């Protein structure tokens, strides 16, 4: 996988910077967007910017290449996965907590209408 997903000599640097540090920041960004009831397309913009910062950390600390489109795309895809997971997890929690008479949780990332609840389509 070295050369495809990461350019550092070991996978541990990729996991530390992109997955752990960047993933945590992406999850928290998704959480913040969900908690302020903003649409999820704004998350894409934030993750594109966060991808630049993750590339800079790779460059500054581990002598990786700063301006490579390939590794920027890989880092940004990982960040998007964590960001959308954080957004969806917190949105599901919001919908079931704030509208508990309308929705029930179906898992960590989903919700469904309660039996007998009349729901407008834009709430789903």
Image (cartoon, helix red, strand yellow):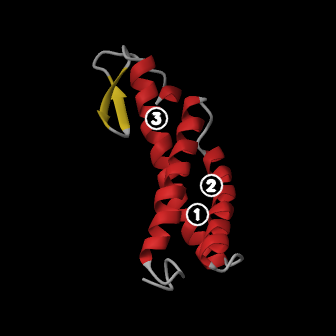
Q: Earlier in the sequence, mark 3 or mark 1?
A: 1
State whether residue 83 is above or below residue 114.
below
* Residue projecting furthest to the right: 67
Helix or strand or loop: what does disc 2 sit on?
helix
Check residue 76 in the rendering and tell me which mark sits there, or answer none: 1
Residues at badges 2 and 3 in contact (C-beta under 8 Å)?
no
For this view, does 44 lie left or right of residue 109? right
Q: Position of residue 124 (x, y in %)?
A: 46, 31
Reading the image, the residue beneath label 2 is 47
**How many numbered markers are drawn?**
3
User: Label 2 crowding class (10 Å Cα cut-off): few <14, some 14-19, many 20+?
Assistant: many
Check residue 90 in the rendering and tell me which mark sits there, or answer none: 3
Q: Position of residue 26 (x, y in %)?
A: 55, 50
Quadrant (top left/top right/bottom left/bottom right) for the N terminus: bottom left
User: Label 1 crowding class (10 Å Cα cut-off): few <14, some 14-19, many 20+?
Assistant: many
Name the residue: 53% across, 38% down. Answer: 31
Residues at badges 1 and 2 in contact (C-beta under 8 Å)?
yes
Q: Position of residue 56 (x, y in %)?
A: 68, 67
């Amino acid at each position: 996988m070295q050369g495809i997903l990461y350019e550092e000599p070991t996978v541990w640097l990729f996991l530390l910077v992109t997955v752990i540090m960047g993933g945590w920041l992406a999850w928290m960004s998704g959480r913040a967007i969900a908690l302020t009831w903003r649409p999820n397309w704004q998350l894409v913009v934030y993750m594109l910017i966060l991808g630049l910062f993750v590339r800079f950390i790779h460059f500054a600390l581990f002598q990786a290449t700063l301006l490579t489109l390939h590794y920027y795309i890989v880092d940004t895809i990982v960040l998007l996965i964590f960001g959308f997971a954080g957004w969806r997890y917190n949105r599901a929690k919001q919908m079931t907590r704030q509208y508990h008479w309308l929705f029930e949780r179906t898992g960590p990332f989903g919700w469904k209408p309660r039996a007998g609840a009349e729901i407008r389509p834009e709430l789903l």
